[in-house]
């Protein structure tokens, strides 16, 4: 009786071409095939390369320890495939099916080889299942991880995009806020505003909330914190761009904005700021 | 023992904090400053904390206490040179130094004090 795994190795080594054909046929017939995203040639090429890599790995080392050094190439290949498929827009199921669909052709081959030897067949089937499952799980994991990387990158980019501090005039800064203010963003906004105050020596900063969709108590508190921090740095704040709806919400919530100058539009705020800086600053100090 | 120097500049007092403020030092400063305000009949106090990189709630409260005491002795207090990180910390601690005037640097703070004095004399 042959040792467990021997038949699987033999199949991978000797009948690779037939195996490849059956596998590609199975993939083409599967409902998860995405003909719109991938051509048959490409699929065939990928399948062929993967089979060669598996065969190399099983020849050199263990059948199921895919974490080992012999499997490095196969793992890299899978990682590359799942990453590119994640970017192309494949679903996790569709990506994992690429590996899992290898089971059926392998089982068919095993059955043909071992036929009546029920015990041997069971052993081989178990080994094959374990191997393919591990490879499939690895693929799915890489797929999810690459998606998460994309999400994190987008979050980071959005964070940077959404907090510009612009200098409008001598001693006047504007901070147009766009999107919801959570604590993390407030932190970023506060830091960049204060940094800019130090750089430019601004006396007044206008916080424009036209682009903030909703103001609840938390957002209002974040705004007030930013105002307080700017005041500690010697800069007064004006909040502008308050829409009628938001004015109503603020009053209904009982948020106290009486300490802060508020204006309906950025233009109004700007004219107030100009007036104040000129009144406050004699000519010789403005340099 | 180290001490925070208090300089007299015309009718104002200038305090420059250049070492890490520990609690004892802050208490000492409070004593010295009130005594000096009375002795020199100062009308304004300028506290420069630009080299202060760390603050805790005690120091924050100390600063607003000192400002309140100076106010009682009829001297306006301006705190200048608060670092961004320090400003954020103070706000997060809930100490926004309500009664204290603030300015970006010594120049601006001086201008503020002089303006205040000029308004009074008019």
Image (cartoon, coloured by chain):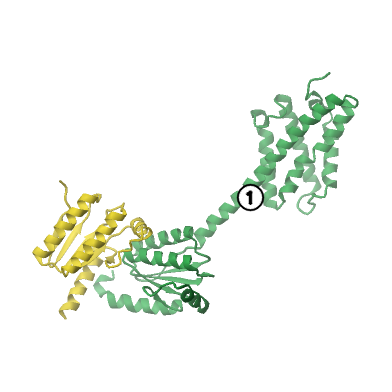
Chain colours: A green, B yellow
Picture layout, residue A104 above or below residue A252 = above
Residue at image point 53% right, 55% down:
A156
Quarter in which the C terminus of chain A is drawn: bottom left
Please tell me which residue is depicted at 73% across the width and 33% down the height of the picture: A53
Q: In the shown orientation, is residue A64 left or right of residue B16?
A: right
- Which residue occupies the extreme left position in the image? B39
Judged left or right of residue A85, residue A23 is right
Q: Which residue is mark 1?
A: A147
Is A98 above or below relative to B47?
Answer: above
Residue A247 lies, in percent from the top left, at 48, 77
Q: Quadrant of residue A174?
A: bottom left
Residue A64 in view here? yes
Residue A235 position in % (x across, y down): 33, 68
Residue found at the far right of this picture: A116
Q: Secondary structure at mark 1?
A: helix
Q: Vertical placement of A187 versus A97: above or below?
A: below
Q: Can I make out residue B75 in this image? A: no
The residue lying at 68 percent from left, 39 percent from top is: A138
Chain letter for mark 1: A
How many labels, in total? 1
- Residue A167 lies in what quarter of the image? bottom left
Whether residue A225 sits left or right of residue A216 in the image: it is left
Q: Nearer the viewer, residue A25 or B94?
A: B94
How many neighbours does mark 1 have within 10 angstroms: few (below 14), some (14-19), or many (20 or more)? some
The front one of B42 and A75 is B42
Query: In which quadrant is the N terminus of chain A drawn?
Result: top right
Residue A30 in percent (x, y) is at 83, 47
From what the image shows, is residue A265 above or below residue A184?
Answer: below
Q: What percent of the width, then of the height, locates residue A237?
A: 37, 70
């Amino acid at each position: 009786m042959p040792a467990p795994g021997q038949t699987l190795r033999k199949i991978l080594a000797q009948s690779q071409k037939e195996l490849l054909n059956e596998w590609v046929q199975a993939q083409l017939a599967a409902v998860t095939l995405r003909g719109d995203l991938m051509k048959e040639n490409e699929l065939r090429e990928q399948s062929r390369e993967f089979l060669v890599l598996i065969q190399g790995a099983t020849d050199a080392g263990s059948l199921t320890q895919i974490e080992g050094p012999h499997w490095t190439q196969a793992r890299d290949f899978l990682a590359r495939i799942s990453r590119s498929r994640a970017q192309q827009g494949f679903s996790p199921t569709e990506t994992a099916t690429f590996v899992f669909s290898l089971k059926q052709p392998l089982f068919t081959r095993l059955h043909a080889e071992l036929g009546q030897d029920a015990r041997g067949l069971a052993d081989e089937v178990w080994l094959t299942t374990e191997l393919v499952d591990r490879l499939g799980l690895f693929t799915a994991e890489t797929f999810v991880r690459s998606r998460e990387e994309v999400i994190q990158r987008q979050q980071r980019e959005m964070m940077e995009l959404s907090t510009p501090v612009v200098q409008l005039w001598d001693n006047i800064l504007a901070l147009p806020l766009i999107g919801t203010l959570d604590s993390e963003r407030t932190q970023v906004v506060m830091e960049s505003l204060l940094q800019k105050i130090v750089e430019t020596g601004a006396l007044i900063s206008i916080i424009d909330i036209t682009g903030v969709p909703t103001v609840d108590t938390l957002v209002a508190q974040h705004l007030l914190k930013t105002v307080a921090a700017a005041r500690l740095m010697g800069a007064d704040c004006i909040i502008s761009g308050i829409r009628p709806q938001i004015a109503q919400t603020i009053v209904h919530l009982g948020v106290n904005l009486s300490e802060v100058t508020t204006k309906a539009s950025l233009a109004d705020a700007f004219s107030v700021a100009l007036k104040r800086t000129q009144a406050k600053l004699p000519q010789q100090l403005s340099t | 023992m180290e001490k925070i120097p208090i300089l007299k500049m015309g009718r104002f007092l200038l305090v420059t904090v250049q070492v890490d403020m520990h609690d004892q030092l802050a208490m000492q400063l409070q004593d010295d400053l009130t005594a000096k305000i009375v002795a020199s009949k100062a009308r304004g106090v300028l506290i420069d904390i630009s080299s202060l990189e760390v603050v805790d709630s005690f120091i924050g409260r100390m600063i607003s206490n000192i400002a309140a005491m100076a106010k009682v002795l009829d001297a306006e207090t301006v705190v200048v040179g608060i670092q961004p990180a320090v400003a954020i910390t103070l706000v997060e601690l809930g100490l926004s130094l309500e009664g204290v005037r603030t300015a970006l640097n010594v120049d601006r703070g001086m201008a503020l004090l002089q303006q205040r004095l000029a308004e009074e004399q008019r």
